[in-house]
Image (cartoon, helix red, strand yellow):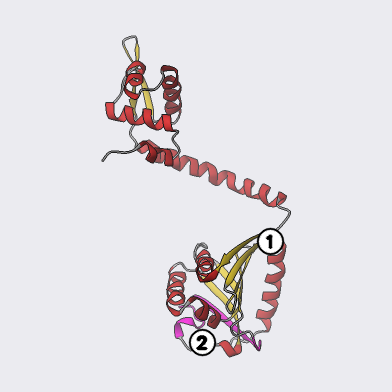
């Protein structure tokens, strides 16, 4: 299988690095002069690129007599480099996130238009870690009407497979007969009911991952996610208060 330089560029190589690295792999190695001729790159550029590839662990240098000879290391080193980079990012991420949040003076709002947008919003919930919880006001009827029964059924199956708990406060008039949409440990769903007349098909407000998601299920099909620690905290307090007053039946 031949590999185009463009494929290596996708994983972080510069165009010239990719060209030289593929030349090395094709030849199995060579001197700087040989690699210059084979790659059609300038000699100073080849030296600079060889140094860069050595730093990445992709090229080894040895002496053949008085001449330096360069050979490619096993390509598995690419995966090792990515794993090292991921570990470094994981270590940096908490501090970078803290800096971002400290200087992000205005809440971030993302909008999702139409039925596909609302489906995308729900798919974001499925990316929560296993054992996570999300909390919502609204009705399953809103979801079924807006998203379709097939989507809601598959979404529910995936949520259960992922071990994500759904905690909902429903209008009493919107209780669902479908056993897969009722509250149970099997369904990873906890439900309570409130007398909220007129809210049957308005939409939902969901609290997840320190964010607030809202979608309209009637005339204007749209959704949004608000990222605000303060707003989340306030709404979670409201949810907890309503949950304590709501009926489990």
CA neighbours of label 2 inside 10 A, class few (<14), some (14 to 19), many (20+):
some
For residue 32, what is the image quadrant? Answer: top left
| Relative depth, front residue between 202 and 211 | 202
Residue 133 visible, this angle:
yes
Residue 185 shown left or right of residue 134 in the figure: left
Q: Farthest residue to the front: give it.
A: 219
For residue 209, what is the image quadrant? Answer: bottom right
Assign a secondary structure to mark 1: loop
Residue 88 shown left or right of residue 69 in the figure: right
Q: Measured from the top left, where is residue 35 in percent x and y?
A: 34, 21
Q: Measured from the top left, where is residue 18 in percent x and y?
A: 39, 32
Q: Measured from the top left, where is residue 73 in percent x and y?
A: 34, 30
Residue 91 shown left or right of residue 14 in the figure: right
Q: Is residue 4 above or below residue 37?
A: below
Q: Quadrant of the N terminus?
A: top left
Q: Which residue is mark 1?
A: 228
Query: What segment is highlighted magenta in the picture?
Result: 179-198
Q: Which mark is residue 176?
A: 2
Assign a secondary structure to mark 2: loop
Q: Quadrant of the C terminus?
A: bottom right
Q: Measured from the top left, where is residue 227 in percent x and y?
A: 65, 61
Residue 57 visible, this angle:
no
The verdict on residue 122 being magenta is: no
| Relative depth, front residue between 58 and 32 | 32
Q: Which mark is residue 12?
A: none
């Amino acid at each position: 299988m031949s590999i185009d330089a463009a494929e290596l560029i996708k994983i972080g190589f510069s165009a010239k690095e990719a060209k030289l690295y593929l030349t090395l792999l094709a030849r199995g190695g060579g001197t700087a002069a040989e690699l210059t001729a084979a790659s059609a790159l300038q000699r100073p550029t080849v030296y600079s690129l060889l140094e860069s590839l050595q730093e990445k662990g992709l090229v080894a240098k040895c002496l053949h007599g008085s001449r330096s000879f360069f050979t490619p290391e096993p390509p598995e080193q690419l995966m090792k480099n990515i794993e090292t980079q991921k570990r470094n990012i994981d270590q940096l991420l908490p501090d970078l996130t803290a800096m971002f949040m400290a200087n992000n003076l205005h809440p971030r709002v993302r909008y999702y238009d139409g039925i596909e947008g609302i489906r995308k919003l729900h798919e974001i919930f499925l990316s929560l870690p296993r054992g996570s919880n999300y909390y919502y006001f609204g009705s399953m009827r809103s979801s079924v009407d807006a998203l379709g029964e097939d989507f809601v059924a598959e979404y529910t199956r995936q949520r259960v497979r992922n071990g994500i708990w759904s905690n909902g406060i429903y209008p009493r008039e919107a209780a669902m007969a479908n056993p897969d949409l009722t509250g149970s440990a099997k369904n990873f769903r906890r439900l309570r009911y409130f007398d909220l007349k007129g809210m049957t098909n308005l939409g939902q407000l969901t609290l997840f991952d320190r964010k607030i998601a809202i979608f309209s299920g009637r005339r204007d099909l749209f959704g949004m996610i608000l990222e605000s620690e303060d707003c989340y905290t306030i709404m979670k307090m409201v949810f907890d208060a309503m949950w304590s007053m709501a009926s489990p039946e």
